[in-house]
Amino acid sequence: MITAALYDAKSYDREYFEKAAGRENIAWHFHEFRLSAETASTAAGREAVCVFVNDRVDRSCLTELSKAGVRHIALRCAGFNNVDVAAANELGFTVTRVPAYSPHAVAEHAIALLLTLNRRIHRAHNRVREHNFSLGGLVGFDIHGKTAGIIGTGKIGRIAAQIFRGFGARVLAHDPFPAADWANEAGVEYSDLDSLLENSDILSLHLPLTPETFHLFSEDTFRKLKPGAYLINTSRGKLIDTTALIQSLKSGRLGGVALDVYEEEEGVFFEDLSDKVLQDDELSRLLTFPNVLITSHQAFLTREALAEIARVTTANLNQFQAGEPFLSGTEVR
Ligand code: NAI
Protein backbone atom coordinates (compact mmCIF):
# COMPACT_ATOMS: atom_id res chain seq x y z
CA MET A 1 0.00 0.00 0.00
CA ILE A 2 1.29 3.48 -0.89
CA THR A 3 -0.06 6.67 0.70
CA ALA A 4 -0.43 9.71 -1.51
CA ALA A 5 -1.76 13.25 -1.02
CA LEU A 6 -3.60 14.80 -3.95
CA TYR A 7 -3.72 18.62 -3.92
CA ASP A 8 -6.12 21.10 -5.55
CA ALA A 9 -8.63 18.22 -5.57
CA LYS A 10 -11.93 18.79 -7.36
CA SER A 11 -14.99 16.52 -7.42
CA TYR A 12 -14.02 15.18 -10.84
CA ASP A 13 -10.49 14.28 -9.63
CA ARG A 14 -11.93 12.18 -6.78
CA GLU A 15 -14.43 10.54 -9.09
CA TYR A 16 -11.89 9.42 -11.67
CA PHE A 17 -9.05 8.54 -9.24
CA GLU A 18 -11.44 6.52 -7.08
CA LYS A 19 -12.48 4.35 -10.01
CA ALA A 20 -9.09 3.94 -11.76
CA ALA A 21 -7.82 0.40 -12.21
CA GLY A 22 -5.05 -0.35 -9.67
CA ARG A 23 -6.41 2.11 -7.08
CA GLU A 24 -6.66 -0.73 -4.48
CA ASN A 25 -2.98 -0.31 -3.57
CA ILE A 26 -3.18 3.45 -3.02
CA ALA A 27 -4.48 5.25 0.08
CA TRP A 28 -5.49 8.65 -1.31
CA HIS A 29 -5.73 11.77 0.85
CA PHE A 30 -7.53 14.48 -1.08
CA HIS A 31 -6.85 18.14 -0.23
CA GLU A 32 -8.85 20.95 -1.80
CA PHE A 33 -6.09 23.51 -1.20
CA ARG A 34 -3.01 23.84 -3.38
CA LEU A 35 0.47 22.53 -2.58
CA SER A 36 3.15 25.14 -1.85
CA ALA A 37 5.95 25.61 0.69
CA GLU A 38 3.30 26.84 3.15
CA THR A 39 1.08 23.75 2.85
CA ALA A 40 3.77 21.09 2.25
CA SER A 41 3.77 19.92 5.89
CA THR A 42 0.31 18.41 5.24
CA ALA A 43 2.12 15.72 3.23
CA ALA A 44 3.79 14.32 6.36
CA GLY A 45 3.55 10.54 6.35
CA ARG A 46 2.71 10.31 2.62
CA GLU A 47 5.15 8.74 0.19
CA ALA A 48 3.89 10.66 -2.84
CA VAL A 49 2.10 13.86 -3.73
CA CYS A 50 -0.10 14.36 -6.78
CA VAL A 51 -0.22 17.91 -8.14
CA PHE A 52 -1.85 19.94 -10.90
CA VAL A 53 -0.95 23.06 -12.89
CA ASN A 54 -1.29 25.68 -10.14
CA ASP A 55 0.41 23.86 -7.27
CA ARG A 56 3.75 25.61 -6.64
CA VAL A 57 6.42 22.95 -6.27
CA ASP A 58 9.49 25.19 -6.02
CA ARG A 59 12.71 24.50 -4.16
CA SER A 60 11.37 25.60 -0.78
CA CYS A 61 8.26 23.46 -1.19
CA LEU A 62 10.44 20.50 -2.20
CA THR A 63 12.65 21.00 0.86
CA GLU A 64 9.54 20.84 3.08
CA LEU A 65 8.25 17.77 1.23
CA SER A 66 11.59 16.07 1.69
CA LYS A 67 11.47 16.76 5.45
CA ALA A 68 7.91 15.35 5.48
CA GLY A 69 9.20 12.08 4.01
CA VAL A 70 7.71 12.40 0.50
CA ARG A 71 9.74 10.73 -2.28
CA HIS A 72 7.67 11.00 -5.43
CA ILE A 73 5.94 13.88 -7.23
CA ALA A 74 3.18 12.81 -9.65
CA LEU A 75 1.98 15.62 -11.91
CA ARG A 76 -1.52 14.87 -13.21
CA CYS A 77 -0.95 17.18 -16.19
CA ALA A 78 1.42 17.49 -19.16
CA GLY A 79 3.17 20.84 -18.49
CA PHE A 80 5.69 20.80 -15.61
CA ASN A 81 6.80 24.45 -15.48
CA ASN A 82 5.45 24.68 -11.89
CA VAL A 83 7.89 22.06 -10.58
CA ASP A 84 11.59 22.84 -10.04
CA VAL A 85 12.69 19.56 -11.60
CA ALA A 86 16.43 20.17 -11.06
CA ALA A 87 15.86 20.78 -7.35
CA ALA A 88 13.55 17.75 -7.16
CA ASN A 89 16.16 15.44 -8.69
CA GLU A 90 18.86 16.93 -6.48
CA LEU A 91 16.73 16.20 -3.39
CA GLY A 92 16.19 12.61 -4.53
CA PHE A 93 12.56 12.83 -5.68
CA THR A 94 11.32 11.02 -8.74
CA VAL A 95 8.93 13.11 -10.84
CA THR A 96 6.36 11.87 -13.34
CA ARG A 97 3.72 13.56 -15.47
CA VAL A 98 1.00 12.53 -17.89
CA PRO A 99 2.48 13.65 -21.19
CA ALA A 100 -0.54 12.95 -23.41
CA TYR A 101 -3.90 12.33 -21.80
CA SER A 102 -5.95 13.67 -24.66
CA PRO A 103 -4.37 16.07 -27.11
CA HIS A 104 -7.75 16.01 -28.86
CA ALA A 105 -9.47 17.52 -25.80
CA VAL A 106 -7.18 20.57 -25.85
CA ALA A 107 -7.11 21.07 -29.63
CA GLU A 108 -10.90 20.76 -29.82
CA HIS A 109 -11.32 23.31 -27.02
CA ALA A 110 -9.07 25.77 -28.87
CA ILE A 111 -11.32 25.48 -31.92
CA ALA A 112 -14.47 25.71 -29.75
CA LEU A 113 -13.15 28.99 -28.33
CA LEU A 114 -12.42 30.35 -31.79
CA LEU A 115 -15.83 29.39 -33.17
CA THR A 116 -17.63 30.83 -30.15
CA LEU A 117 -15.70 34.09 -30.25
CA ASN A 118 -15.80 34.54 -34.01
CA ARG A 119 -19.51 33.71 -34.43
CA ARG A 120 -20.44 35.48 -31.16
CA ILE A 121 -22.23 32.35 -29.91
CA HIS A 122 -21.84 33.39 -26.26
CA ARG A 123 -23.46 36.75 -26.95
CA ALA A 124 -26.18 35.29 -29.19
CA HIS A 125 -27.07 32.73 -26.52
CA ASN A 126 -27.50 35.44 -23.88
CA ARG A 127 -29.60 37.57 -26.24
CA VAL A 128 -31.96 34.79 -27.25
CA ARG A 129 -32.51 33.85 -23.60
CA GLU A 130 -33.70 37.44 -23.11
CA HIS A 131 -35.99 37.06 -26.18
CA ASN A 132 -33.76 39.48 -28.09
CA PHE A 133 -33.64 37.94 -31.56
CA SER A 134 -31.71 40.77 -33.27
CA LEU A 135 -28.43 40.12 -35.09
CA GLY A 136 -26.61 43.49 -34.83
CA GLY A 137 -23.01 43.07 -33.65
CA LEU A 138 -22.93 39.33 -34.32
CA VAL A 139 -21.08 39.36 -37.67
CA GLY A 140 -18.22 36.84 -37.86
CA PHE A 141 -15.97 35.55 -40.65
CA ASP A 142 -15.54 32.29 -42.60
CA ILE A 143 -12.55 30.25 -41.40
CA HIS A 144 -12.47 28.66 -44.86
CA GLY A 145 -9.84 30.44 -46.94
CA LYS A 146 -8.21 32.18 -43.95
CA THR A 147 -4.65 31.56 -42.76
CA ALA A 148 -4.19 29.89 -39.36
CA GLY A 149 -0.78 30.12 -37.67
CA ILE A 150 0.05 27.26 -35.31
CA ILE A 151 2.94 27.94 -32.93
CA GLY A 152 4.22 24.60 -31.60
CA THR A 153 3.48 21.47 -33.63
CA GLY A 154 3.70 18.79 -30.95
CA LYS A 155 0.81 16.52 -30.09
CA ILE A 156 -1.84 19.22 -29.62
CA GLY A 157 -0.64 21.68 -32.28
CA ARG A 158 -0.72 19.02 -35.00
CA ILE A 159 -4.33 18.09 -34.21
CA ALA A 160 -5.33 21.76 -34.18
CA ALA A 161 -3.58 22.24 -37.54
CA GLN A 162 -5.44 19.28 -39.02
CA ILE A 163 -8.79 20.61 -37.79
CA PHE A 164 -8.01 23.96 -39.45
CA ARG A 165 -7.17 22.10 -42.68
CA GLY A 166 -10.58 20.44 -42.39
CA PHE A 167 -12.18 23.90 -42.43
CA GLY A 168 -10.31 24.65 -45.66
CA ALA A 169 -7.89 27.10 -44.05
CA ARG A 170 -4.27 27.56 -45.12
CA VAL A 171 -2.07 26.52 -42.17
CA LEU A 172 1.32 28.05 -41.37
CA ALA A 173 3.33 26.47 -38.55
CA HIS A 174 6.37 27.33 -36.50
CA ASP A 175 8.40 24.96 -34.32
CA PRO A 176 12.16 24.73 -33.63
CA PHE A 177 11.79 21.00 -34.43
CA PRO A 178 9.62 20.90 -37.57
CA ALA A 179 7.93 17.61 -38.48
CA ALA A 180 8.43 17.74 -42.25
CA ASP A 181 6.75 14.43 -43.15
CA TRP A 182 3.67 15.22 -41.11
CA ALA A 183 3.47 18.73 -42.63
CA ASN A 184 3.67 17.36 -46.19
CA GLU A 185 0.95 14.87 -45.49
CA ALA A 186 -1.30 17.38 -43.68
CA GLY A 187 -0.76 20.18 -46.21
CA VAL A 188 0.82 22.46 -43.58
CA GLU A 189 3.62 24.95 -44.39
CA TYR A 190 6.39 25.62 -41.88
CA SER A 191 7.57 29.21 -41.70
CA ASP A 192 9.75 31.47 -39.58
CA LEU A 193 7.96 33.09 -36.65
CA ASP A 194 7.85 36.62 -38.10
CA SER A 195 6.21 35.57 -41.39
CA LEU A 196 3.71 33.47 -39.46
CA LEU A 197 2.85 36.47 -37.26
CA GLU A 198 2.54 38.81 -40.25
CA ASN A 199 0.42 36.47 -42.39
CA SER A 200 -1.97 34.71 -40.01
CA ASP A 201 -5.61 35.70 -39.56
CA ILE A 202 -5.84 33.32 -36.59
CA LEU A 203 -3.00 32.35 -34.24
CA SER A 204 -3.14 29.38 -31.90
CA LEU A 205 -0.48 28.69 -29.27
CA HIS A 206 0.57 25.08 -28.61
CA LEU A 207 4.09 25.42 -27.22
CA PRO A 208 5.37 24.92 -23.67
CA LEU A 209 6.23 27.70 -21.24
CA THR A 210 10.01 27.85 -20.78
CA PRO A 211 12.38 30.73 -19.91
CA GLU A 212 12.76 31.24 -23.71
CA THR A 213 9.02 31.35 -24.45
CA PHE A 214 8.01 33.53 -21.46
CA HIS A 215 6.15 36.59 -22.91
CA LEU A 216 6.61 35.35 -26.46
CA PHE A 217 3.70 37.68 -27.13
CA SER A 218 5.09 41.07 -26.08
CA GLU A 219 4.37 44.61 -27.27
CA ASP A 220 6.79 44.02 -30.14
CA THR A 221 5.09 40.75 -31.17
CA PHE A 222 1.60 42.31 -31.16
CA ARG A 223 2.92 45.06 -33.45
CA LYS A 224 3.88 42.43 -36.05
CA LEU A 225 0.41 40.84 -36.25
CA LYS A 226 -1.93 41.26 -39.17
CA PRO A 227 -4.50 43.89 -38.13
CA GLY A 228 -7.69 42.19 -36.92
CA ALA A 229 -5.98 38.86 -36.16
CA TYR A 230 -7.54 36.50 -33.61
CA LEU A 231 -5.33 34.95 -30.94
CA ILE A 232 -6.12 31.73 -29.05
CA ASN A 233 -4.09 30.54 -26.06
CA THR A 234 -4.77 27.13 -24.57
CA SER A 235 -1.12 26.56 -23.58
CA ARG A 236 0.17 28.62 -20.67
CA GLY A 237 -0.79 32.14 -19.56
CA LYS A 238 2.73 33.47 -19.22
CA LEU A 239 3.33 33.07 -22.96
CA ILE A 240 1.46 36.38 -23.28
CA ASP A 241 2.34 39.71 -21.66
CA THR A 242 -1.12 40.71 -20.42
CA THR A 243 -0.35 44.45 -20.30
CA ALA A 244 0.71 44.35 -23.96
CA LEU A 245 -2.36 42.26 -24.82
CA ILE A 246 -4.68 44.84 -23.27
CA GLN A 247 -2.94 47.66 -25.18
CA SER A 248 -3.28 45.73 -28.42
CA LEU A 249 -7.01 45.19 -27.77
CA LYS A 250 -7.56 48.84 -26.86
CA SER A 251 -5.82 50.01 -30.01
CA GLY A 252 -8.06 47.74 -32.10
CA ARG A 253 -5.06 45.91 -33.58
CA LEU A 254 -6.34 42.53 -32.40
CA GLY A 255 -9.67 41.28 -33.72
CA GLY A 256 -10.28 39.07 -30.72
CA VAL A 257 -8.63 36.95 -28.06
CA ALA A 258 -9.68 33.64 -26.55
CA LEU A 259 -7.85 32.46 -23.45
CA ASP A 260 -8.11 29.20 -21.56
CA VAL A 261 -5.03 30.16 -19.55
CA TYR A 262 -4.05 33.45 -17.98
CA GLU A 263 -0.76 34.88 -16.75
CA GLU A 264 -1.93 35.26 -13.14
CA GLU A 265 -4.48 32.44 -13.05
CA GLU A 266 -3.09 30.83 -9.88
CA GLY A 267 -5.59 31.27 -7.05
CA VAL A 268 -8.32 32.48 -9.43
CA PHE A 269 -8.92 29.80 -12.05
CA PHE A 270 -10.69 26.66 -10.77
CA GLU A 271 -12.24 28.67 -7.88
CA ASP A 272 -15.78 29.98 -7.38
CA LEU A 273 -15.20 33.68 -6.65
CA SER A 274 -18.71 34.75 -7.65
CA ASP A 275 -19.40 36.43 -4.30
CA LYS A 276 -15.96 38.03 -4.01
CA VAL A 277 -14.44 41.24 -5.37
CA LEU A 278 -11.99 40.33 -8.14
CA GLN A 279 -8.60 41.71 -7.08
CA ASP A 280 -6.82 41.30 -10.43
CA ASP A 281 -7.29 44.58 -12.36
CA GLU A 282 -5.93 43.22 -15.63
CA LEU A 283 -8.22 40.19 -15.60
CA SER A 284 -11.13 42.52 -14.73
CA ARG A 285 -10.20 44.75 -17.68
CA LEU A 286 -9.97 41.78 -20.05
CA LEU A 287 -13.47 40.71 -19.01
CA THR A 288 -14.88 44.07 -20.17
CA PHE A 289 -13.93 43.65 -23.85
CA PRO A 290 -16.66 42.39 -26.16
CA ASN A 291 -14.05 40.54 -28.23
CA VAL A 292 -12.42 38.59 -25.38
CA LEU A 293 -13.53 35.12 -24.36
CA ILE A 294 -12.07 33.43 -21.29
CA THR A 295 -12.47 29.91 -19.93
CA SER A 296 -10.91 28.79 -16.69
CA HIS A 297 -8.22 26.28 -17.82
CA GLN A 298 -10.76 23.69 -18.88
CA ALA A 299 -9.33 22.58 -22.22
CA PHE A 300 -8.30 19.23 -20.71
CA LEU A 301 -11.71 18.60 -19.14
CA THR A 302 -13.20 15.68 -21.04
CA ARG A 303 -14.22 12.26 -19.71
CA GLU A 304 -11.56 10.62 -21.85
CA ALA A 305 -8.78 12.90 -20.57
CA LEU A 306 -9.75 12.52 -16.89
CA ALA A 307 -9.84 8.73 -17.20
CA GLU A 308 -6.43 8.69 -18.87
CA ILE A 309 -4.90 11.05 -16.28
CA ALA A 310 -6.13 8.78 -13.45
CA ARG A 311 -5.00 5.61 -15.25
CA VAL A 312 -1.42 6.80 -15.95
CA THR A 313 -0.93 8.43 -12.54
CA THR A 314 -2.25 5.36 -10.70
CA ALA A 315 -0.08 3.03 -12.78
CA ASN A 316 3.02 5.13 -12.05
CA LEU A 317 2.35 5.18 -8.29
CA ASN A 318 2.10 1.38 -8.39
CA GLN A 319 5.36 1.21 -10.35
CA PHE A 320 7.00 3.51 -7.79
CA GLN A 321 5.79 1.29 -4.96
CA ALA A 322 7.08 -1.83 -6.70
CA GLY A 323 10.42 -0.18 -7.55
CA GLU A 324 9.73 -0.81 -11.25
CA PRO A 325 10.40 1.59 -14.17
CA PHE A 326 7.73 4.25 -14.77
CA LEU A 327 5.51 4.14 -17.85
CA SER A 328 7.42 5.09 -20.97
CA GLY A 329 7.86 8.84 -21.49
CA THR A 330 6.30 9.88 -18.18
CA GLU A 331 9.39 10.48 -16.04
CA VAL A 332 10.63 14.10 -15.89
CA ARG A 333 14.34 14.72 -15.18
P1 NAI B 1 4.34 18.74 -27.00
O1 NAI B 1 5.55 18.63 -26.15
O2 NAI B 1 3.84 17.52 -27.70
O3 NAI B 1 4.56 19.88 -28.10
C1 NAI B 1 5.10 21.14 -27.84
C2 NAI B 1 5.77 21.61 -29.12
O4 NAI B 1 6.19 22.97 -28.92
C3 NAI B 1 7.03 20.81 -29.50
O5 NAI B 1 6.93 20.36 -30.84
C4 NAI B 1 8.16 21.82 -29.32
O6 NAI B 1 9.24 21.62 -30.24
C5 NAI B 1 7.43 23.12 -29.59
N1 NAI B 1 8.14 24.32 -29.14
C6 NAI B 1 9.00 24.47 -28.10
N2 NAI B 1 9.47 25.73 -28.07
C7 NAI B 1 8.89 26.39 -29.09
C8 NAI B 1 9.00 27.71 -29.60
N3 NAI B 1 9.78 28.61 -29.01
N4 NAI B 1 8.27 28.04 -30.69
C9 NAI B 1 7.46 27.15 -31.27
N5 NAI B 1 7.34 25.87 -30.86
C10 NAI B 1 8.03 25.50 -29.77
O7 NAI B 1 3.21 19.35 -26.06
P2 NAI B 1 1.63 19.27 -26.24
O8 NAI B 1 1.10 18.03 -25.58
O9 NAI B 1 1.27 19.52 -27.66
O10 NAI B 1 1.16 20.49 -25.32
C11 NAI B 1 1.43 21.83 -25.67
C12 NAI B 1 1.15 22.72 -24.47
O11 NAI B 1 -0.25 22.71 -24.17
C13 NAI B 1 1.78 22.19 -23.15
O12 NAI B 1 3.10 22.66 -23.00
C14 NAI B 1 0.88 22.76 -22.09
O13 NAI B 1 1.43 23.99 -21.65
C15 NAI B 1 -0.44 23.03 -22.82
N6 NAI B 1 -1.56 22.25 -22.28
C16 NAI B 1 -2.68 22.92 -21.85
C17 NAI B 1 -3.78 22.24 -21.36
C18 NAI B 1 -5.04 22.94 -20.94
O14 NAI B 1 -5.90 22.33 -20.28
N7 NAI B 1 -5.24 24.21 -21.27
C19 NAI B 1 -3.74 20.77 -21.23
C20 NAI B 1 -2.54 20.14 -21.76
C21 NAI B 1 -1.49 20.88 -22.25
Image (spheres, rainbow, N blue to C red):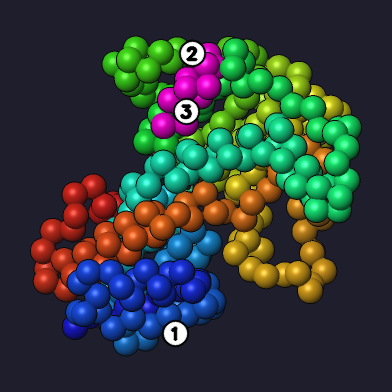
Residue at 19%, 83% (x, y): give it: 1
Q: Which of marks 3 and 2 is nearer the N terminus?
A: 3
Residue at 64%, 44% (x, y): give it: 259
Q: Which percent across, then down, holds residue 197?
A: 62, 19
Residue 71, labelled with which disc?
none
Q: Which percent across, then down, holds residue 116?
A: 67, 39
Neighbour tally class for label 1: few under 14, some 14-19, many 20 plus, Cα within 10 Å: some
Residue placed under numbered mark 3 in the picture: 163
Q: Which amino acid does label 2 sit on?
A: Ser
Residue placed under numbered mark 1 in the picture: 42
- Residue 170 is at least partly visible in this image: yes
Residue placed under numbered mark 2 in the picture: 191
Q: Describe the element under mark 2 as helix, strand or loop.
A: loop
Q: Which percent across, then down, holds residue 79?
A: 43, 50
Mark 2 vs mark 1: in front: 2
Q: Which amino acid does label 3 sit on?
A: Ile
Residue at 39%, 50% (x, y): give it: 78
Instruction: Please name whichever residue, 66 or 302, is drawn nearer the observer in this view of the structure.
Output: 302
Q: Describe the element under mark 3 as helix, strand or loop.
A: helix
Mark 3 C-beta to ligand 1 under 8 Å: no
To which quarter of the image does residue 232 belong? top right
Q: In this view, does 44 lie to the left or right of 61?
A: left
- Residue 37 is at least partly visible in this image: no
Marks 3,2: beta carbons within 8 A:
no
Q: In this view, does 290 lie to the left or right of 179?
A: right
Q: What stretch is highlighted in magenta?
A: 159-172
Residue 169 falls inside the magenta stretch: yes
**Quadrant field for ligand 1:** top left
